[in-house]
Image (spheres, helix red, strand yellow):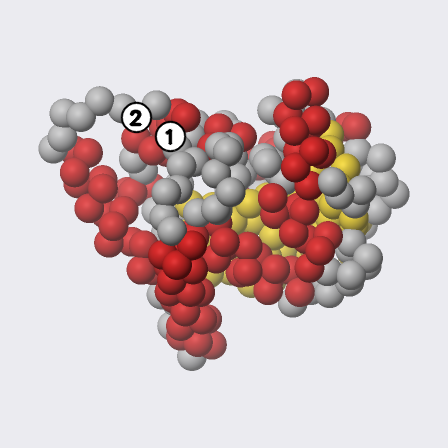
Amino acid sequence: MDLLEITDNKIKHPWELARKVIVNQLISSVQKENINILDVGSGDAYLADNFTREFPNTQAHCVDTGYTTENVDQIEHNFQNTKLHLYNSLDKVTINAVNVVTLLDVIEHVPDDVALLNAILEKSYINKNSFFLITVPAYQSLFSRHDELLLHYRRYNLQLLHKTAAATNLKVLDSGYFFATLLIPRILQVLTEKFSSKQDKELGNLGTWKGSPFTTSLIKNVLLMDYRISRLFKFLGIKLPGLSCYMLCTCNKV
């Protein structure tokens, strides 16, 4: 979760819970254990903490320029996880080699996404055995006030995502969309914004999820079923659209 969206809620948003499962599946397709993971833009470190529990012998190195001493203390208190290592700069990461790099809904936050990826690729701990997993919000036509409040510069389609990779030293292994079922609600939201005079909500409300455990679980399972159907169609050569897209890459660095 983005640092802007951190709340005291104990129940995670079903979108975040479903995305966690999807990300874990994509990571396990290239690396199943003994992972040194670099999670760039790690926010509240929820996913990074999960990586260390999901994959055997995994260390998670979390980088977020928004980290303050207070943020770090809060995260360390929340997770009590000695496998989490928190930094506010890529330059402060102290590790010899990273085999998985995650940028999960991160590159849309920077004005120059290619520059960010190149800055990571230049680090000594990145090598030809490093895989990159990138997720981003899909379709610029769905750019809304919610994106503006989250300080997004853009949304992506697969063509733009591949173009971004081509401008760096990354080779795309797999890519696609997920969460097709969320497209209609987002389209309605964008249309409503165009014809509405409502005032902006406060930033503090962005991460709020008030659903019950039952509702949360139900929506999460619907989203996971959505992803499985998309993967089936992809296997058949049909790429379904979705509210998010991903790209799994290998590093061409010598």
Q: Residue at x 70, y 38 (%)?
A: 62
Q: Left or right: 22 with respect to 94?
A: left
Q: Secondary structure at mark 2?
A: loop
The image position of residue 244, as x and y in percent, is 42, 52
Q: Left or right: 23 with respect to 230?
A: right
Please say if the residues under marks 2 and 1 sit with CB atoms less than 8 Å apart: yes
The image position of residue 182, as x and y in percent, is 32, 54
Report which residue position mark 2 lands on.
201
Q: Quarter-wise, where is residue 54 in the image?
A: bottom right
Residue 76 vs residue 193, the one in the foreground: 76
Report which residue position mark 1 lands on.
205
What kind of residue is marked 1? Asn
**Taking 153 as reference, is 212 above or below it?**
below
Q: Quarter-wise, where is residue 92 in the image?
A: top right
Let me know if residue 46 appears in the view: yes
Q: Left or right: 107 with respect to 212?
A: right
Disc 2 residue crowd, few under 14, some 14–19, many 20+, Cα 10 Å: few
Disc 1 residue crowd, few under 14, some 14–19, many 20+, Cα 10 Å: few
**Taking 178 as reference, is 89 above or below it?**
above
Residue 107 vs residue 228, the one in the foreground: 228
The image position of residue 85, as x and y in percent, is 77, 37
What kind of residue is marked 2? Lys
Q: Left or right: 11 with respect to 192?
A: right
**Taking 80 as reference, is 232 above or below it?**
below
Q: Residue at x 42, y 30 (%)?
A: 150
Residue with the most extreme bottom position: 236
